[in-house]
Amino acid sequence: MPRYYLGVDGGGTNCRVRLADENLKTLAEVKNGRSNLQIDDGEPAYKAISDGTRDVFKAAGIDFSETANTYACFGMAGGRMDSARRIPRLAPALCRCQSL
């Protein structure tokens, strides 16, 4: 079973999403909208990550169901602020990530 790695670099002006294989060879990279967690209760960030993930799998020619075999790492603008942990849609994921 193949393994994939998804990297998300979320900033205030754009969000870059990269997909790599198990040897860390880049398969595809996409760029889309702003993704600072402090903007509009994190909704633009949620959309940028969701859309970017779908777009990068499509660009790599890999079925989206392979997200089940994918590890992900996020670097998000505004993510270190306490208020990011109170965004209902994002709080569970942020709390899990920070406890690792």
Image (tube, grey):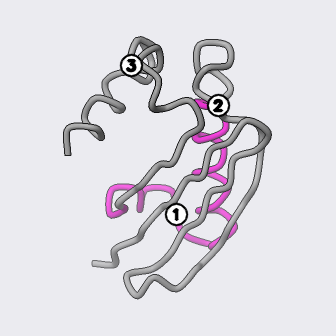
* First in sequence: mark 2 vs mark 1: 2
Quadrant of the rendered structure where residue 61 is?
bottom right
Helix, strand or loop at label 1? It is: loop
**Foreground label between 3 and 1:** 3
- Quadrant where the N terminus sits is bottom left
Q: Does residue 62 appear left or right of residue 23 in this picture?
A: right
Quadrant of the rendered structure where residue 35 is?
top right
The image shows residue 87 at horizontal and vertical percentages of 46, 14
Query: Residue beneath label 2, please?
Result: 36
The image shows residue 48 at horizontal and vertical percentages of 67, 38
Residue at x 68%, y 19% (from the top left corner) = 39
Query: Does 32 lie within the magenta span?
Result: no
- Within-10-Å neighbours for mark 1: few <14, some 14–19, many 20+: few
Residue at x 59%, y 37% (from the top left corner) = 77
Query: Residue beneath label 3, please?
Result: 85
Instruction: Identify residue type, mark 3.
Output: Arg
Query: Residue beneath label 1, please?
Result: 63
Instruction: Identify residue type, mark 1.
Output: Asp
Helix, strand or loop at label 3? It is: helix
* First in sequence: mark 3 vs mark 1: 1
> Farthest front residue?
81
The residue closer to the viewer here, 79 or 8, is 79
Residue at x 56%, y 30% (from the top left corner) = 78
Query: Does 59 lie within the magenta span?
Result: yes
On screen, residue 18 above or below 99: below
On screen, residue 38 above or below 35: above
- Within-10-Å neighbours for mark 3: few <14, some 14–19, many 20+: some
On screen, residue 49 above or below 60: above
Residue range in magenta is 45-70
Residue at x 45%, y 79% (from the top left corner) = 21
Whole-angstrom CA distance, mark 3 to mark 1, is 31 Å
Labelled pair 3, 1 in contact (Cβ < 8 Å): no
